[in-house]
Image (cartoon, coloured by chain):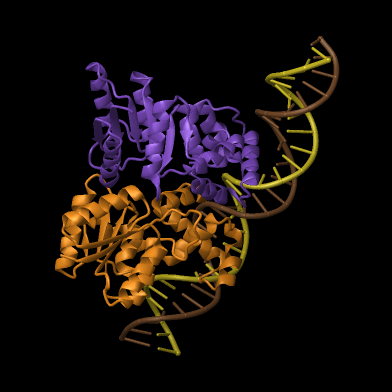
Chain colours: A purple, B orange, C brown, D yellow
DNA sequence: TTTGATTTTACGGGAAACCGTAAAGGAGCG
DNA sequence: CGCTCCTTTACGGTTTCCCGTAAAATCAAA
């Protein structure tokens, strides 16, 4: 089993429960932090001391408080950590259940396992720990495997997301071409933008753009 | 201190941590449930046995899973519980930080305390427990007191919310008068509806209706 | 290079949203 | 009742959105 693990989790209640769980697995050295920035610092220090962490268990969303931070989400933390220690293993432990986001963790951040916080998540966390320790294969709970067959994420691409995001930020469809040209996003003609929004409304069965944005928000697309 | 307490919380990690915390306060009988329905059942049974719970600690959002439930949120649970045992004290323990929702808990559900899950929430939970046990006054952490001075909830009324909700459901502004007439919502002329949406955009500094709905979603207004 | 399919762009007409102004309706008060 | 204040409603003009058609550009394969 792992011997040196770092837990990044802002909620004190969960933080304690996870630490207890790791103890039960006889993991000798378990460190807990409540801020992403602290996690990165600890990992840096451990690297310098030549005693690197073998595993990072992290949440995705961290509450903002009075303390200003460089890193404000699990995603940002993972990216920063992998830059300085690419071989570290990562388990994400989160309530996040939006397929788009979970999928991206595996595809873009190359995490080793995803455990959904729920009514039976501590046993699942143990299971994930064992799997990740034993092999290099990706691990995800059986009841979440459907995520990878999810049609939405296959058919909605980055361009669509940017389009929806800018609409939600209040950019008028009519001015979107200007915005996109400034940002170097292509294609950027009024016509194409208009058509793309039309397709999205079609796809999500939205009556109008307002409805589309509400749906996208609900799906966690933005 | 309380001697018989029920904890309703779906996440096993938090559930365990809360139970441990209550133990530390020397509360003899602590029961935990992971479903709202189970909470109501336990409270009913305890009432019938003439050994009622003195306090309910509950989360607000409960994950849906394979099991079909009557009650699906802390709000629903509290309403149901107060019907059969109006004198029970209630502490809400949640990550919910939308002023609108928290405020409504105190004003409509008459809860005794609200504790925000966060980096230092277990000590705060202890504090709330003591306060609620000692007096009948409402308790909320100092850093959340601003909620009751919050301007948004004062100036945005039920009518506005319904308007925003229907927009988010895809009802066109132009057809909203028909929808409102059907539902008996007044005023319902095109002109007034148009003006009201205009005011909301003004108030929230939204560029257009799409933007407005995105903001409302972010604020948890809908 | 030609061919054909697909994507991007242009444009025009009708629908909906946006914005200001003004009339109509209602509540409160002398 | 008459007056004021405020809310609701009506309406016209402008802008933006919506939708179809068609031309231009891009790309892959023959």
At x 65%, y 41%, the residue is A199
The mark tally for this picture is 0
Q: Nearer the viewer, residue B140 or B135?
A: B135
Q: Nearer the viewer, residue A76 or A20?
A: A20
Q: Give the x, y percent position of residue A13.
A: 27, 47
The answer to whether B48 is drawn above or below residue A179 in the figure is below
Quarter of the rendering containing residue B37: bottom left
Q: Nearer the viewer, residue C6 or A180?
A: C6
Q: Give the x, y percent position of residue B154.
A: 33, 63
Quarter of the rendering containing residue B126: bottom left
At x 59%, y 57%, the residue is B172
At x 38%, y 29%, the residue is A90
Residue A221 seen? no
Q: Quadrant of the N terminus of chain A?
A: top left
At x 20%, y 56%, the residue is B23
The answer to whether B101 is drawn above or below residue A166 in the figure is below
> In the drawing, does residue B189 fall left or right of residue A44?
right
> In the drawing, does residue A221 fall left or right of residue A30?
right
Q: Give the x, y percent position of residue A61.
A: 36, 40
> In the drawing, does residue B9 fall left or right of residue B167?
left
The answer to whether B118 is drawn above or below residue B57 in the figure is above
The answer to whether A181 is drawn above or below residue A212 in the figure is above
Q: Give the x, y percent position of residue D10.
A: 60, 68
Quarter of the rendering containing residue A6: top left
Residue A180 seen? yes
């Amino acid at each position: 089993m792992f011997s040196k693990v770092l837990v990044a989790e802002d909620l004190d209640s969960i933080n304690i429960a996870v630490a207890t769980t790791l103890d039960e697995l006889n993991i000798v050295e378990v460190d807990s932090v409540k801020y992403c920035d602290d996690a990165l610092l600890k990992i840096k220090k451990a690297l310098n001391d030549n005693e690197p962490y073998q595993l990072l268990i992290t949440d995705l969303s961290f509450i903002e408080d009075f303390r200003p931070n460089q890193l404000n989400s699990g995603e940002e933390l993972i990216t920063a950590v992998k830059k300085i220690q690419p071989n570290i293993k990562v388990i994400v432990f989160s309530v996040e259940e939006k397929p788009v986001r979970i999928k991206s963790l595996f595809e873009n951040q190359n995490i080793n396992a995803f455990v959904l916080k729920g009514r039976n998540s501590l046993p699942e966390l143990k299971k994930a720990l064992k799997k990740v320790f034993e092999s290099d294969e990706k691990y995800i709970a059986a009841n979440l495997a459907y995520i990878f067959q999810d049609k939405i994420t296959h058919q909605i691409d980055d361009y669509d997301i940017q389009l929806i995001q800018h609409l939600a930020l209040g950019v008028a469809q009519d001015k979107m071409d200007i915005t996109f040209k400034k940002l170097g996003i292509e294609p950027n003609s009024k016509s194409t933008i208009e058509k793309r929004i039309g397709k999205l409304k079609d796809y999500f069965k939205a009556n109008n753009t307002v409805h589309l944005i509400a749906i996208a928000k609900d799906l966690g697309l933005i």
